């Protein structure tokens, strides 16, 4: 999912909210598709009932089930996600790169699983696909020239 906005503040007493848009135009938002707001770490679907531009990168919105000031205040500061936007492919997906755990070769990256909050590398380890979390705490070095990624993985993560 791609973050498309952030709830900046409530607007009025009927549950309207002011949202700040991230790298999209209001016309790109499909009001027939759900957007998601996280509650307790889980994405909860909502639909925009109305969406009116306010300046260049903001909008006044009304979403389903947010019908009063109290409900609107509960989502202030939260990110708004959508899953219908195609995320741009980046060169940082590491496909074809060789992964090392310290000095030991693990395998070759075959893709990237863009799990929100926990992106993982798909790595071919001796003919088997293994998911390895791509967390900044694990990265020791990245060498674009030789296309190698050196990690310091917790013991037992890759057998």
Image (spheres, rainbow, N blue to C red):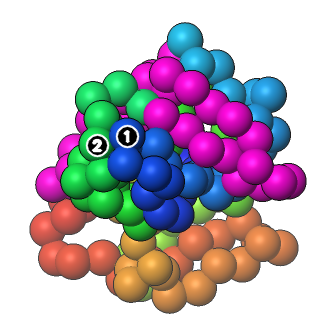
Query: Looking at the magenta stretch, what is its main secondary structure?
Result: strand
- With 105 as the anchor, is 96 left or right in this view? right
Mark on residue 157?
Answer: none
Most foreground residue, 141 or 135: 135
**Residue at 39%, 84% in the rendered image:** 137
The quadrant holding residue 14 is: top left
Q: Is residue 94 visible?
A: no
- In this rendering, the answer to whether 141 lies above or below 127 is below
> For mark 2, what is the residue?
68
**Circle 1 sits in a helix, a strand or a loop, which is it?**
loop
Callout 2: few (<14), some (14-19), or many (20+) C-alpha neighbours within 10 Å?
Answer: some
Identify the secondary structure beneath mark 2.
loop
Q: Which residues are magenta?
A: 33-62
Q: Name which quarter of the figure residue 155 lies in.
A: bottom left
Q: Position of residue 29 (x, y in %)?
A: 68, 28
Say left or right for 4 vs 154.
right
Classify 10 Å Cα crowding around label 1: few (below 14), some (14-19), many (20 and above).
Answer: some
- 43 within the magenta span: yes
Query: Which residue is farthest top?
Result: 32
Q: Position of residue 87 (x, y in %)?
A: 68, 39
User: Does the magenta run of residues contain 151?
Assistant: no
When the figure is inspected, residue 64 is found, relative to residue 133, above or below; the finding is: above
Point out the tag, 1 or 2, that comes first from the N-terminus.
1
Query: Residue reaching furthest front?
Result: 13
Could you say which disc has been placed on residue 14 in the image?
A: 1
- Image side of residue 96 versus residue 109, left or right: right
Q: Are marks 1 and 2 in contact (CB under 8 Å)?
A: yes
Q: How far apart are labels 1 and 2 at the CA level?
A: 5 Å
Q: Where does the image place residue 148, in percent across and percent down from the top left?
A: 64, 70
Name the residue rendered at 30%, 76% in the picture: 153
| Residue situated in front as seen by the camera: 155 or 93 | 93
Q: In the picture, which quadrant includes the C terminus?
A: bottom left
């Amino acid at each position: 999912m791609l973050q498309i906005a952030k709830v900046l503040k409530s607007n009025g007493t009927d549950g309207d909210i002011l949202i700040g848009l991230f790298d999209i135009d209001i016309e790109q938002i499909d009001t027939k598709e759900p957007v998601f707001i996280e509650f307790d770490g889980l994405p909860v679907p909502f639909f925009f009932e109305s969406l009116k531009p306010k300046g260049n990168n903001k909008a006044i919105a009304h979403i389903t089930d947010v019908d009063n000031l109290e409900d609107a205040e509960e989502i202030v500061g939260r990110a708004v996600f959508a899953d219908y936007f195609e995320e741009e492919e980046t060169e940082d997906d590491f496909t074809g790169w060789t992964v090392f755990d310290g000095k030991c070769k693990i395998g070759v990256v075959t893709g990237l699983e863009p799990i929100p909050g926990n992106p993982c590398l798909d790595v071919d380890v001796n003919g088997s696909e293994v998911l390895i979390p791509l967390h900044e705490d694990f990265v020791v070095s990245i060498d674009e020239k030789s296309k190698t990624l050196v990690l310091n993985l917790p013991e037992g993560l890759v057998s």
